[in-house]
Image: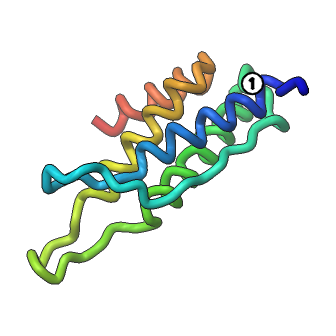
Amino acid sequence: MRISFPILTAAVILAVLSFGAHADTSGQPAKITGRSLVYYGDLDLKAEQDAKIMLARIEQAAKKACGGHRTFSSYTGRIENTFDECRSEAIARAVKQLSAPVVTRIYSEARQRES
């Protein structure tokens, strides 16, 4: 059985997002809250537009894996930041693991504009 590179990398991205899907604010062991698979066999990651599509897919997968939205804590009376942290870390790890130069460049440029 031969596994194609895009399928293998999609599986690796799934693992990266799964391990990134946690909230560890109390010193307790990380809790995986979800998984999400990113397909990209239909994309040419050397093309700018397809790289942007890939980033959008990674962002959606990270959102899903990290619980979908911020949560309000009835104990503290505040919105918890764990969702944003989980999502950001999952995206960063997925982009790094994917190791696609155009995707990495676009991601890095967007992060610089946010700062």
Residue 25 sits above or below residue 49 on the image: below
State the image coordinates of residue 108 (x, y, percent, origin top left). Answer: 44, 26
State the image coordinates of residue 87 (x, y, percent, origin top left). Answer: 40, 49
Q: Along the horizontal axis of the image, is 13 left or right of 20?
A: right
Which residue is at a point 52% across and 21% down the rendered structure image? 105
Which residue is at a point 50% across and 56% down the rendered structure image? 65
State the image coordinates of residue 22 (x, y, percent, origin top left). Answer: 35, 53
Q: Along the horizontal axis of the image, is 72 left or right of 12?
A: left
Crowd tier of the residue under label 1, counting other residues whose Cα lies within 10 Å: few below 14, some 14–19, many 20 or above: few
On-image quarter of the N terminus: top right
Nearer the observer, 45 or 65? 65
Q: Secondary structure at mark 1?
A: loop
- Kindly give the residue lying farthest to the bottom in the view shown: 74
Tell me which corner region of the image, top left, top right, bottom left or bottom right, holds residue 48.
top right
Q: Which residue is mark 1?
A: 47
Which residue is at a point 33% across and 67% down the rendered structure image? 70
On-image quarter of the C terminus: top left
Colour option used: rainbow
Which residue is at a point 35% across and 29% down the rendered structure image? 112
Residue 111 sits above or below residue 72 on the image: above
Tell me which corner region of the image, top left, top right, bottom left or bottom right, holds residue 81.
bottom left
Residue 64 sits above or below residue 88 on the image: below
State the image coordinates of residue 52 (x, y, percent, origin top left). Answer: 64, 37
- Kindly give the residue lying farthest to the left in the view shown: 76
Nearer the observer, 45 or 39? 39
Q: How many discs appear?
A: 1
Tag 1: amino acid: Ala
- Kindly give the residue lying farthest to the right in the view shown: 1
- Kindly give the residue lying farthest to the top in the view shown: 101
Q: Along the horizontal axis of the image, is 104 left or right of 77?
A: right
